[in-house]
Amino acid sequence: MGKKLSEIQEEYLELIYRLEEKEGVAKTGRIAQELKVALGTVTNTVANLEKKGFLTHRPYVGIKLTEKGRKIALEILRRHRLSERLLTDVLKIPWSAVHDIACKLEHVINRDVTEAIEKSLEYPQTCPHGNPVPDKDGRILRDSYEPLVNLPVKSKGRVMKIVNEKEDLLKYLATLGLLPGVEIEIEEKAPFGGPILVKVSEARYALGQEISSSIYVKRD
């Protein structure tokens, strides 16, 4: 594979993979927003990664990983999600706090340590937020879960995963009881991109579009 990638380059590949999964393509503006860096910094790093064959960038269209880039991204994602499981299952750290810690661990643990974590945890299929853990060969489970924002009124389902793992959002969802495995029902949807009224047990909550887009549901 040549010279080892830097931590920031690994962060870019992982983020681009996540954005592709959620939005179909990664845009430089979204990367800058997520990583809180200047747009020029993103442009330079993306150009460098493209030169090395990890991605393709079409101006005004977006960024996509090559097979080479995707392989690295999935390795990083595997280390990240298994680290999250270790932190929650063994060290009992709250699920809202583990993402940022795992972002650091993913760059320092090697493949042997990753496999040891996986074995000790008895091969978990998902991270604590419900997102699938890639296997050691780079395969990842494909599901048919839908973002809550897409569900019609009166539909019911079970929360399966939260794709936005920011600590403040996860803390908020935990206070509402909106965790993987919870049954929900869509009661109302305001027009023109307004809030969605969701029933959770006997409680009702109005969720905005951004939150509703981060919660993925399996319909009943």
Image (spheres, rainbow, N blue to C red):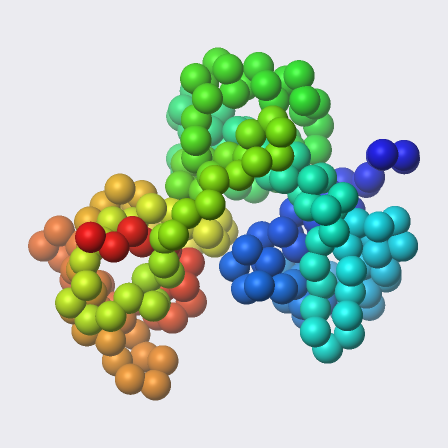
Q: Is residue 67 left or right of residue 96?
A: right
Residue 71 against residue 47 in the figure, above or below: above
Residue 85 against residue 147 in the figure, above or below: above
* Residue in front for this viewpoint, 214 or 147: 147
Find residue 189 and report its image quarter: bottom left
Is any atom of residue 99 visible in this view? yes
Say which quadrant the N terminus sits in.
top right
Q: Is residue 161 left or right of residue 77?
A: left
Give the total number of marks visible in the rendering: 0
Residue that sits furthest to the left in the current view:
202
* Residue in front for this viewpoint, 197 or 22: 22
Find residue 199 and report its image quarter: bottom left
Which residue appears at 31% of the width and 43% of the height?
A: 180
Which residue appears at 49% of the width and 24% of the height?
A: 86
Q: Is residue 152 left or right of residue 23?
A: left
Residue 111 against residue 16 in the figure, above or below: above
Q: Is residue 9 left or right of residue 35?
A: right
Find residue 210 and report its image quarter: bottom left
Residue that sits furthest to the bottom in the current view:
192
Which residue appears at 81% of the width and 40% of the height?
A: 6
Residue 105 lies, in percent from the top left, at 63, 31
Residue 28 lies, in percent from the top left, at 71, 67
Is any atom of residue 45 visible in this view? no
Which residue appears at 63% of the width and 39% of the height?
A: 74
